[in-house]
Image: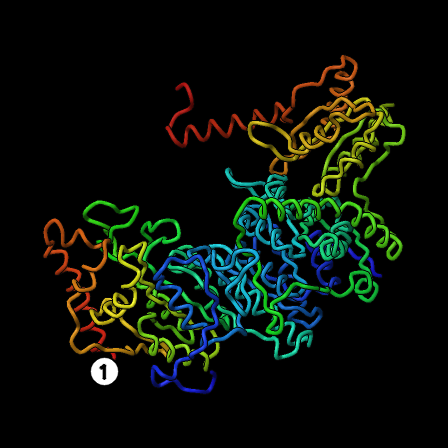
């Protein structure tokens, strides 16, 4: 796909490279993102995977990948990307492999690793200007272990470790800004429900070298509590309500790639998910809903000022 | 071949240089730093090819080491103590990946309390990981063993990572005369790394270190790794003999010193075994038929060689520079497991703990250990494990405690 620019949905790849039959949950928003990215990056890739939902993508003797994959550990998938990138460079330099055997190195982790345990390894990979792609599928909690809260969990969400009617008391960590503060080649947010925006970002990062990082919001039917048929709808609402801003950072500048003129009220997004049900039942918590809405409005008033 | 005064750290760096390693992920920790500083300078000055990258932790360092090795390059790294423990999750993982890298561990006691000086609780924490372990007692051994470790690790019958262990300070910072092999014969001995089926290539994609579902698959891979580690005993012997032919030095699986007619033995690992040799010489002068048995390989564990070395002796004193809390000496336990149930008359075993945090073991203590052992044999009764500690040390400790008490409470105890 390199060199070709995707402008319309019809131009997205029609062949799907990632095999079926994985043990991911029905309606997994993370797998949706991985499918879309893999179709563009192709099989000349090697993934370094951290412990998380996607640990079980490859189970001996099967793999859904037509390219390569290495399972590592929760904290150090970016360090494995360093080892593989360096080893491939050494092999190419010493002519022990032909140039055609080179691979793009991609780190694949969930939010538990990206926002927490693996943050030091990611920071250091950026310090070293590692030429790699990082994809975080962010389902806003430790999903594989039953959706306990992580530092990616949004305020007020019920999780397995914040079960009471107040939900999670903290606020979702701003990983985009933390990553961008390292001034890597590229950082962007994506979501599977906006495949054109995602494809254009993956194309853009392929033109660049150095650390290129993506955070994909991954609606999670089992963790968030909604029917798997609603994954795309909830994904779109995340963008349309403005709770998941689509943006990219490069050349010292952050630009929003989708600015919604008339944002929908956030409650349209919240009320479809069991994790926010306590904001509506048994009685509506107007104060909390208004606070969540106010934070979103505040974000966008600042963001639009900065972009223009 | 040249002969120079080298530290243990310098010897380890020379081993890596002569093995023509491709990749060195690093992270500094006392007392290992001289190894990576030396390699960095050689690479910067063009005296050594290879790429070194300083990672942000030992956990990341071993991950990068394993990932690079799995991609098909020859990898070297070095750590110590807390660093080895911090890396432990990946120590186990990369052994399971069957990546034949070599890691030098510069032994140092483990926190808490924090200390800089050596004992073996750090390296023994990696005992069950799948890394093979070779323990060195001289700087020459560190260099030779690092070179041999690549042959052992990369052998198709083994394919496992190797830890080469040396004591911090006593070897790492101590200069000894070391013969450095010329680069060409060293390169011929080590050979090129042939990763065979390991590697990530566009033309041959593969998924590695994948999950298994079901205990049958898990057990199979774990057994396979164990059997490969057992194979390393005979492969090591081949490698050590070839090394002797090429370079004239032989480093056996189990070193024995003055054991031919010995009735008693000290059993020790690493550099303090040279103190035991001195103890043997002194005791021999006073008529005690004693020798030294020093396992160099701890994993795979050389049961046969140890049983043979100790066969027919009346008693053996195992001196452990480690302490398994609530049990005692690790080497003692392992030696006992090797001897128990053997046909030949096994010697009576006595357990001593000493040398923790770099504490010296004096000549007098070796006499005392030998006397305790002889008495135990005479009465045919194994003594209780002894923790080596002198009255002077206890007195000095009491003084420190008194100061600590004043610091905390403003008065001496009892005032």
Residue B250 sits above or below residue A9 on the image: above
The residue drawn where x is 33% and y is 68% is A177
Residue B371 occupies which quadrant of the picture?
A: top right
Residue A101 sits above or below residue A26 on the image: below
Q: Residue furthest top?
A: B379
Q: Chain of mark 1?
A: A
Observer-nearest of A136 and B298 = A136
Q: Is residue B255 visible?
A: yes
Colouring mode (rainbow / by chain / secondary structure / one colour): rainbow
The residue drawn where x is 33% and y is 54% is A141
Residue bearing the label numbered 1:
A308
The percent coordinates of residue B348 (x first, y second) are 76, 21
The percent coordinates of residue B55 (x first, y second) are 53, 61
Residue A256 sits above or below residue B368 on the image: below
The percent coordinates of residue A222 (x first, y second) are 32, 54
The residue drawn where x is 14% and y is 60% is A291
The percent coordinates of residue B76 (x first, y second) are 66, 59
Tag 1 secondary structure: loop
Residue B159 occupies which quadrant of the picture?
A: bottom right
Q: Is residue B307 left or right of residue A207?
A: right
Observer-nearest of B57 and A210 = A210
């Amino acid at each position: 796909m390199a060199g070709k620019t995707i402008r319309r949905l019809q131009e997205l790849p029609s062949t799907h490279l990632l095999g079926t039959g994985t043990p991911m949950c029905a309606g997994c928003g993370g797998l949706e993102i991985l499918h879309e990215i893999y179709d563009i990056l192709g099989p000349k890739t090697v993934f370094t995977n951290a412990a998380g939902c996607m640990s079980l993508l490859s189970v001996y003797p099967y793999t859904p990948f037509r390219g390569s994959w290495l399972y590592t550990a929760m904290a150090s998938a970016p360090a494995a990307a360093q080892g593989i990138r360096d080893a491939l460079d050494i092999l190419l330099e010493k002519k022990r492999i032909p140039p055609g055997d080179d691979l793009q190195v991609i780190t694949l982790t969930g939010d538990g690793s990206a926002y927490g345990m693996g943050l030091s390894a990611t920071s250091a990979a950026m310090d070293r200007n590692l030429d790699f792609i990082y994809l975080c599928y962010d389902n806003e909690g430790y999903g594989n272990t039953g959706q306990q809260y992580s530092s990616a969990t949004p305020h007020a969400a019920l999780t397995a470790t914040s079960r009471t009617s107040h939900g999670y008391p903290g606020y979702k960590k701003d990983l985009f800004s933390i990553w961008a503060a390292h001034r890597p080649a590229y950082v962007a947010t994506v979501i599977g429900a906006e495949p054109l925006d995602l494809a254009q970002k993956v194309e853009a990062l392929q033109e660049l070298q150095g650390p290129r990082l993506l955070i994909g919001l991954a609606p999670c039917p089992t963790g968030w509590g909604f029917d798997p048929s609603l994954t795309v709808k909830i994904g779109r609402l995340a963008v349309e309500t403005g709770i998941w801003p689509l943006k990219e950072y490069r050349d010292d500048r952050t630009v929003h790639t989708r600015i919604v003129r008339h944002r929908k009220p956030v409650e349209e997004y919240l009320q479809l998910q069991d994790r926010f049900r306590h904001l509506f039942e048994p009685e509506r918590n107007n104060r909390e809903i208004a606070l969540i809405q106010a934070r979103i409005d505040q974000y966008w008033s600042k963001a639009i000022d900065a972009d223009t | 071949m040249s002969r120079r005064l080298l530290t243990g750290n310098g010897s380890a760096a020379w081993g890596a240089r002569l093995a023509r390693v491709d990749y060195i992920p690093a992270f500094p920790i006392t007392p290992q730093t001289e190894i990576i500083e030396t390699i960095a300078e050689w690479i910067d000055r063009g005296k050594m090819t290879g790429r070194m990258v300083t990672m942000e932790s030992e956990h990341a360092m071993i991950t990068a080491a394993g990932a690079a090795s799995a991609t098909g390059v020859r990898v070297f790294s070095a750590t110590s103590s807390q660093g080895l423990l911090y890396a432990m999750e990946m120590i186990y993982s990369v052994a399971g990946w069957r990546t034949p890298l070599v890691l030098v561990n510069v032994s140092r006691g483990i926190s808490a309390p924090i200390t800089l000086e050596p004992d073996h609780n750090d390296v023994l924490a990696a005992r069950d990981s799948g890394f093979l372990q070779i323990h060195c007692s001289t700087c020459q051994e560190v260099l030779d063993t690092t070179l041999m470790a690549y042959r052992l690790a990369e052998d198709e019958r083994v394919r496992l990572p190797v830890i080469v262990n040396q004591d911090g300070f006593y070897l790492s910072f101590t200069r000894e005369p070391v013969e450095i092999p010329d680069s060409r014969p060293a390169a011929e001995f080590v050979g090129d790394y042939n990763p065979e089926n390991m590697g990530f290539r566009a033309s041959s994609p593969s998924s590695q270190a994948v999950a298994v579902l079901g205990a049958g698959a898990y057990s199979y891979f774990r057994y396979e790794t164990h059997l490969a580690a057992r194979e390393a005993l005979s492969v090591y012997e081949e490698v050590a003999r070839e090394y002797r032919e090429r370079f004239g030095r032989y480093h056996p699986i189990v070193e024995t010193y003055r054991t031919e007619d010995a009735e008693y033995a000290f059993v020790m690992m690493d550099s303090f075994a040279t103190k035991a040799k001195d103890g043997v010489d002194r005791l021999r002068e006073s008529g005690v038929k004693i020798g030294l048995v020093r396992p160099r390989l701890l994993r795979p564990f050389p049961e046969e060689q140890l049983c043979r070395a100790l066969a027919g002796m009346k008693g053996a004193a195992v001196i452990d520079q480690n302490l398994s809390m609530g049990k005692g000496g690790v080497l003692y336990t392992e030696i006992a497991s090797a001897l128990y149930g053997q046909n030949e008359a096994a010697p009576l075993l006595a357990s001593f703990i000493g040398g923790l945090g770099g504490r010296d073991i004096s000549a007098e203590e070796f006499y005392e250990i030998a006397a305790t052992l002889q008495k135990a044999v005479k009465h045919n009764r194994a003594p209780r494990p002894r923790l080596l500690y002198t009255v002077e040390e206890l007195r000095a400790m009491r003084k420190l405690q008194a100061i600590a008490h004043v610091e905390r409470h403003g008065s001496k105890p009892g005032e």
